[in-house]
């Protein structure tokens, strides 16, 4: 089984920046697609961005040009650099990873999330 741990969330003023990290651990043979999701208060969880092992990326429109997804394959870690933050970016940020374990069936793991609050 693969565990994901997000970190880097916090309280930031509008226009500020944060960098989220997502570290994967466990019996990992390889990780294919990793992604970030967000759940705002009172709303459903939404897709934000994803990155494949070859580093090609996809972003949802609302964060295009402000957020950058990246990863370090050697460290099984993914990042989300968030700039020009807005109050509507507030929410719990989750990471996911599609993995192939050393033994057993491939699967998808989710982290427990990290809170991001954008407020003055």
Image: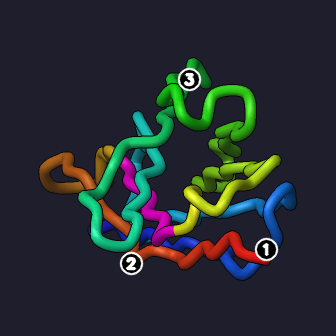
Residue 116 picture location, percent across and down: 61, 73
> What residue span does the magenta drawing correspond to?
91-97
Q: From the viewer's perspective, is residue 37 above or below residue 2?
A: above
Query: Magenta part mainly helix, strand or loop?
Result: strand
Decide if residue 61 is on the left or right side of residue 72: left
Q: From the viewer's perspective, is residue 54 above or below residue 99?
A: above
Looking at the rendered structure, the secondary structure element under dot 3 is: strand
Looking at the rendered structure, the secondary structure element under dot 2 is: loop
State whether residue 52 appears in this view: no
The structure residue drawn at horizontal position 37% and vertical position 42%, both measured from the top left corner, is 47
Residue 101 picture location, percent across and down: 30, 53
Q: Which residue is mark 2?
A: 112
Q: Is residue 110 magenta?
A: no
State whether residue 63 appears in this view: yes
Marked residue nearer the N-terminal end (2 or 3): 3
Query: Gap in Å between the C-alphas at discs 1 and 3?
Result: 26 Å
Query: Gap in Å between the C-alphas at discs 2 and 3?
Result: 23 Å
Q: Which residue is mark 1?
A: 12
Q: Which mark is residue 57?
A: 3
Marked residue nearer the N-terminal end (2 or 1): 1
């Amino acid at each position: 089984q693969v565990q994901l741990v997000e970190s880097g969330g916090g309280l930031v003023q509008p226009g500020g920046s944060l960098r989220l990290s997502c570290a994967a651990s466990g019996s990992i043979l390889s990780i294919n697609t990793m992604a970030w999701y967000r759940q705002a208060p009172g709303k459903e969880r939404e897709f934000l961005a994803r990155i494949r092992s070859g580093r090609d990326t996809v972003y949802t429109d609302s964060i295009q040009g402000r957020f950058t997804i990246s990863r370090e394959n050697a460290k099984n870690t993914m990042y989300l650099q968030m700039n020009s933050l807005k109050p509507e970016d507030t929410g719990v940020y989750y990471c996911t990873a599609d993995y192939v374990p050393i033994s057993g069936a491939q699967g998808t793991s989710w982290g427990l999330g990290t809170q991001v609050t954008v407020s003055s």
